[in-house]
Amino acid sequence: MKHLLTLALTVSAAAAFAHGNVSCPAMPKEEKKPQMELQKKLEAEGWKVRKVKDYNGCYEVYGIDADGKKAEVFYNPKTFERVYAEGEKAADKK
């Protein structure tokens, strides 16, 4: 039981770290572009998008990027500009 609790805490901490501190400014729903529009944009750039969802006011995208790497990336829903998590390495920023 003790090991199960340790594992659960480790997994939840890893998930929190993966998101880092990322958020987008609050905006009215009518200012947000549709998620499908972002998905089509990324697919046109060579992505294989698995899922797009809302997270802290941003669009969170899961998939395979144009370089063939597994990706979890955040975008501003109004501008589709990439949003970087606090502490994300500069080398990770593409």
Image (tube, helix red, strand yellow):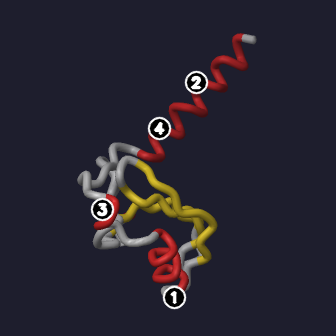
SS for dot 2:
helix
Residue at screen point 49% across, 86% down: 45
Q: Which of the marked residues, 1 or 4, is nearer the chain's N terminus?
A: 4
Q: In this view, does 66 lie above or below 72?
A: below
Residue type at tag 4: Ala
Marks 3 and 4, how far apart in space?
A: 20 Å
Label 1 close to label 4 by CB (< 8 Å): no
SS for dot 1:
helix
Dot label at residue 53: none
Residue type at tag 3: Ala
Classify 10 Å Cα crowding around label 1: few (below 14), some (14-19), many (20 and above): few
Residue type at tag 1: Ala
Quadrant of the image for the N terminus? top right
The residue singled out by tag 3 in the image is 90
Q: Is residue 17 above or below residue 33?
A: above
Q: Give the camera-side residue of 63 and 93.
A: 63
Dot label at residue 9: 2
Q: Which of the marked residues, 3 or 4, is nearer the chain's N terminus?
A: 4
Marks 1 and 2, how far apart in space?
A: 39 Å
Residue 12, quarter of picture? top right
SS for dot 3:
helix
Label 3 close to label 1 by CB (< 8 Å): no
Residue at screen point 70% across, 11% down: 2
Residue type at tag 2: Leu
Label 4 close to label 2 by CB (< 8 Å): no
Q: Which of the marked residues, 3 or 1, is nearer the chain's N terminus?
A: 1
The residue singled out by tag 1 in the image is 44
